[in-house]
C-alpha cells in the first residue's frame, strides 16, 4: 500500500510539473554527416525488409540482391563517367583510402609517398603507419598561407627522386573547404610516372566528375556526405592499375573486398548520388548562397572575424571555417552553441574527441589567439537558420 502511494505521488509530481519543451536544433555540420534523404530511405527499404537474400547465393533471393548491387554499380559508374568494373563498394571513405594507399605500396611498388599535412587522418595515419614500418618513406608538400597546396613544391618533390611514388592529396579539404586542382596534380603524376590517389569524400555528390578524362588512379567517396546512408563507401580503381584485396575471406566485389555486401547501403549510395547529380545546379547554388550569406552577416555584425582557407575563392560551397578572436567566452564557443541547439565543429568529426586542436589550421595559420569553427551546409539548411546562428554568435563571441 505504501509502495502504491509512493508510485502515485511520483506520477502525480511528474504530471503536474511543467515539462521542458524540446529545443529547436540547427544543424551546421554537414561536412561531418548529412541527413538521409527520404527518397534514399524509400529506395533502401525493400532491401531492409523483404529482399534480404545473400548476393552470393544462386537462388532467386540472392539473384535479386546481386542485381540490385550491379545496377547500383552501373548508376555510379555512369554518373562519375567510369566503367562499372572500376567501381568498388566499401564500408566508408576511410576503408577506401586505406585500401588504395596500402595497395599502391605493397602491390604497385611505390617506395615513396607524397602527401600534405592537411589531409584527413584516414590518409595521414595510414602513410605514417607505412613509414614507421619502413614500407615507404613519406614527404609532405608545403601549404601556402591560403591553405592550398604548393603545386610548385609538389613538382619539385616529384622531380627529386626516381623512386616509384604515390601522391595522395584530397580533392576538397574537410575542415577549410579548399579545393585542389586534381587535373593539375594528375598531370604532374603522369609526367613523373607516379600513382595518384585522391580522397574525394567531400566532393563525390557535390562535384561533377569525369573520371575517364581525369588523370587519377584511385578516388575515395562516402555516401553519408551527400544524404546517403552511413556504412557505404566507394573506391574507384582505374582499369590500368591492379591491386590485391585489403580484406580477405571471400570473393565479393570481384575478389577485391571480402565480406557480405551491404546491399541496402549500396542501393542507398546509388540513389543518393543520382539525386545529388539530378539537382546539382539548383542545390549547389542554393547552398553556396547560404555560405556567402553567413560570411556577409558575420563581417557586418561581428568584429575581428576572418575566414580560414580560401573561403571566397577555390573552395567547396558546403564548408566555411570561421576564425574568431580568442577570449574567455569564445574558448567555450562550441559547447555554448551546442547548449543553444546549434551543431557545429572545431574540425574533423573523426577527431572531435581530441584536445590537440585542428592539425589543418596549425599547418598554415598557427595563431594561438584565434578560435576556428567549421560551419557546413546542406540543402536542408535555410536562411532563417543562418540568422539564428548569427544572432547566437553575437551573444557568445
Image (cartoon, rainbow, N blue to C red):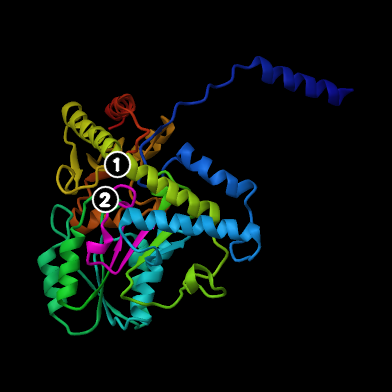
| Labelled disc at residue 114 | none
In the rendered image, residue 244, in percent from the top left (x then y), is placed at 43, 78
Q: Along the polypeptide, which appears first: circle 2 or circle 1?
A: 2
SS category of the residue bearing label 1: helix
In the rendered image, residue 236, in percent from the top left (x then y), is placed at 36, 64
- Residue bounds of the magenta highlight: 197-221
Image-based side of 60 in relation to 396, left or right: right
Work out whether 84 lies above or below 354: below
Outermost right residue: 1
Q: Which residue is mark 2?
A: 208
SS category of the residue bearing label 2: loop
Q: Which one is in front, 318 or 354?
A: 318
Q: Main secondary structure of the magenta part?
A: loop
Report which quarter residue 291 is drawn in.
top left
Circle 1 residues within 10 Å: few <14, some 14–19, many ≥20:
some
Work out whether 38 lies above or below 4: below
Work out whether 79 lies above or below 140: above
Q: Residue at x 53, y 21 (%)?
A: 21
Image-based side of 265 in relation to 235, left or right: right
Circle 2 residues within 10 Å: few <14, some 14–19, many ≥20:
some
Q: Which residue is mark 1?
A: 280
Alpha-carbon span between mark 2 and mark 1: 8 Å
Q: Are the residues flagged by discs 2 and 1 in contact, CB closer than 8 Å?
A: yes
Is 381 a magenta residue? no
Q: Residue at x 46, y 73 (%)?
A: 246
Is 212 a magenta residue? yes
Amino acid at each position: 500500500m505504501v509502495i502504491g502511494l509512493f508510485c502515485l505521488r511520483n506520477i502525480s509530481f511528474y504530471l503536474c510539473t511543467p515539462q521542458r519543451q524540446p529545443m529547436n536544433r540547427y544543424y551546421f555540420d554537414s561536412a561531418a554527416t548529412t541527413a538521409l534523404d527520404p527518397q534514399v530511405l524509400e529506395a533502401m527499404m525493400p532491401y531492409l525488409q523483404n529482399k534480404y537474400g545473400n548476393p552470393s547465393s544462386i537462388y532467386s533471393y540472392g539473384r535479386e540482391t546481386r542485381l540490385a548491387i550491379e545496377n547500383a554499380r552501373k548508376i555510379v559508374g555512369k554518373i562519375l563517367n567510369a566503367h562499372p568494373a572500376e567501381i568498388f563498394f566499401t564500408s566508408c571513405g576511410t576503408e577506401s583510402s586505406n585500401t588504395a594507399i596500402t595497395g599502391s605500396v605493397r602491390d604497385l611498388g611505390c617506395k615513396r609517398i607524397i602527401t600534405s599535412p592537411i589531409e584527413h587522418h584516414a590518409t595521414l595515419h595510414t602513410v605514417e603507419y607505412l613509414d614507421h614500418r619502413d614500407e615507404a618513406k613519406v614527404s609532405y608538400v608545403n601549404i601556402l598561407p591560403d591553405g592550398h597546396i604548393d603545386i610548385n613544391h609538389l613538382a619539385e618533390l616529384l622531380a627529386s627522386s626516381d623512386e616509384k611514388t604515390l601522391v595522395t592529396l584530397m580533392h576538397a579539404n574537410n575542415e577549410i573547404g579548399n579545393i585542389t586542382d586534381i587535373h593539375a596534380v594528375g598531370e604532374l603524376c603522369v609526367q613523373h610516372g607516379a600513382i595518384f590517389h585522391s580522397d574525394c569524400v567531400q566532393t563525390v555528390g557535390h562535384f561533377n566528375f569525369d573520371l575517364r578524362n581525369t588523370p587519377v588512379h584511385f578516388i575515395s567517396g562516402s555516401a553519408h556526405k551527400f544524404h546517403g546512408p552511413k556504412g557505404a563507401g566507394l573506391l574507384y580503381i582505374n582499369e590500368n592499375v591492379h591491386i590485391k584485396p585489403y580484406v580477405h575471406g571471400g570473393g565479393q566485389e570481384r575478389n577485391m573486398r571480402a565480406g557480405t555486401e551491404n546491399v541496402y547501403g549500396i542501393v542507398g549510395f546509388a540513389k543518393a548520388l543520382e539525386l545529388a547529380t539530378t539537382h546539382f545546379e539548383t542545390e549547389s547554388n542554393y547552398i553556396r548562397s547560404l555560405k556567402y550569406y553567413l560570411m556577409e552577416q558575420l563581417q557586418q555584425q561581428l568584429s575581428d572575424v576572418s575566414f580560414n582557407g580560401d573561403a571566397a575563392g577555390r573552395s567547396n560551397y558546403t564548408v566555411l571555417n570561421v576564425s574568431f578572436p580568442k577570449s574567455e567566452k569564445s574558448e567555450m564557443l562550441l559547447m555554448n552553441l551546442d547548449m543553444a541547439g546549434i551543431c557545429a565543429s572545431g574540425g574533423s568529426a573523426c577527431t572531435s574527441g581530441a584536445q590537440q586542436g585542428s592539425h589543418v589550421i596549425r599547418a598554415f595559420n598557427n595563431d594561438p589567439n584565434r578560435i576556428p569553427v567549421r560551419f557546413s551546409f546542406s540543402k536542408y539548411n535555410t536562411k532563417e537558420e543562418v540568422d539564428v546562428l548569427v544572432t547566437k554568435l553575437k551573444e557568445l563571441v
